[in-house]
Image (cartoon, helix red, strand yellow):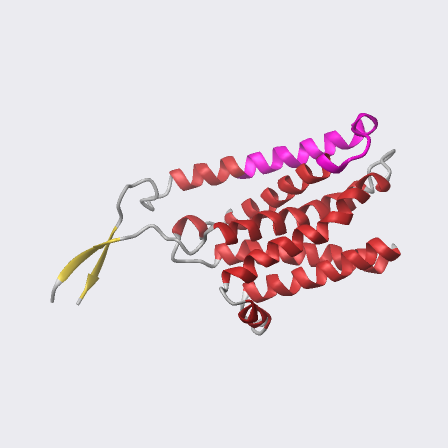
């Protein structure tokens, strides 16, 4: 029996293209959810979020292209839809497609059913995206129970940023700022909780080198 140690290498699987997918796709879905919820705020006109709703599908498409280019061959990207029953990445791609089609149709026709479909697809997209990382058991920092919440609320936070940049009259909507502030505080609480949990578990996250023992 020979006991040996292997030094681990920095992973490079989740590069820039994956970041584009998580950032643009996540903020598109998160912003759409917030824009729909904002409709229920008294004295706030839903028309104020129309600018964002018009670019949300584009953001999702750009994020999805990041995922497609990650396959190195665009033809291979169609295989992402073939394993919806068991793969969270396939579910993410499916919900992204449904969201784009439903949100574009809703923007053109303003039908409640299309809005509902787009909203459900946005929720499904964020859940799928969050569980992709959570199910990556080989990365201990991602397998924490707070990871899905962290990804979900970070996407909400990113979506709020897009909405604020596209609001036509920021001086006339003070009512919505309190709602946005609550969402941002929730995101901050989740981040602090995640970092505290990460710091207090013995995963070796902060070590410069992690050794893996194997038996031959």
| In this picture, residue 164 sits left or right of residue 140 | right
Give the x, y percent position of residue 134: 49, 55
Q: Count the marks: how many? A: 0
Image quarter (top left, top right, bottom left or bottom right) of the N terminus: bottom left
x 51%, y 48%: residue: 147
Q: Is residue 183 visible?
A: yes
Image quarter (top left, top right, bottom left or bottom right) of the C terminus: bottom left
x 87%, y 54%: residue: 110
Determine whether 127 is above or below 177 in the image.
Answer: below
Report if residue 166 lies within the magenta region.
Answer: yes
Determine whether 186 is above or below 82 in the image.
Answer: above
x 72%, y 54%: residue: 57
Give the x, y percent position of residue 96: 66, 60
Give the x, y percent position of residue 117: 77, 60
Q: Which range is magenta?
A: 165-190
| In this picture, residue 12 sits left or right of residue 66 | left
């Amino acid at each position: 029996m020979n006991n040996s140690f292997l030094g681990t290498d920095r992973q490079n699987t989740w590069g820039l293209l994956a970041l584009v997918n998580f950032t643009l796709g996540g903020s598109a879905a998160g912003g759409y959810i917030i824009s729909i919820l904002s409709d229920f705020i008294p004295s706030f006109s839903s028309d104020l979020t129309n600018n964002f709703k018009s670019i949300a599908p584009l953001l999702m498409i750009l994020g999805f292209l990041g995922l497609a280019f990650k396959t190195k061959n665009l033809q291979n990207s169609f295989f992402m839809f073939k394993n919806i029953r068991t793969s969270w990445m396939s579910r993410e791609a499916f919900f992204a497609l449904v969201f784009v089609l439903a949100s574009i149709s809703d923007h053109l026709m303003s039908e409640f059913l299309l809005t509902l479909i787009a909203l459900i697809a946005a929720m499904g997209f964020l859940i799928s995206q969050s569980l992709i990382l959570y199910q990556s058991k080989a990365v201990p920092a991602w397998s924490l129970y707070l990871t899905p919440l962290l990804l979900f609320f970070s996407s909400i936070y990113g979506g709020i940023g897009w909405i604020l940049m596209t609001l036509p009259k920021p001086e006339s909507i003070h009512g919505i700022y309190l709602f946005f502030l609550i969402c941002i505080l929730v995101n901050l609480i989740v981040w602090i909780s995640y970092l505290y949990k990460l710091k207090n578990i013995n995963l070796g996250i902060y070590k410069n080198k992690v050794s893996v023992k194997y038996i031959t």
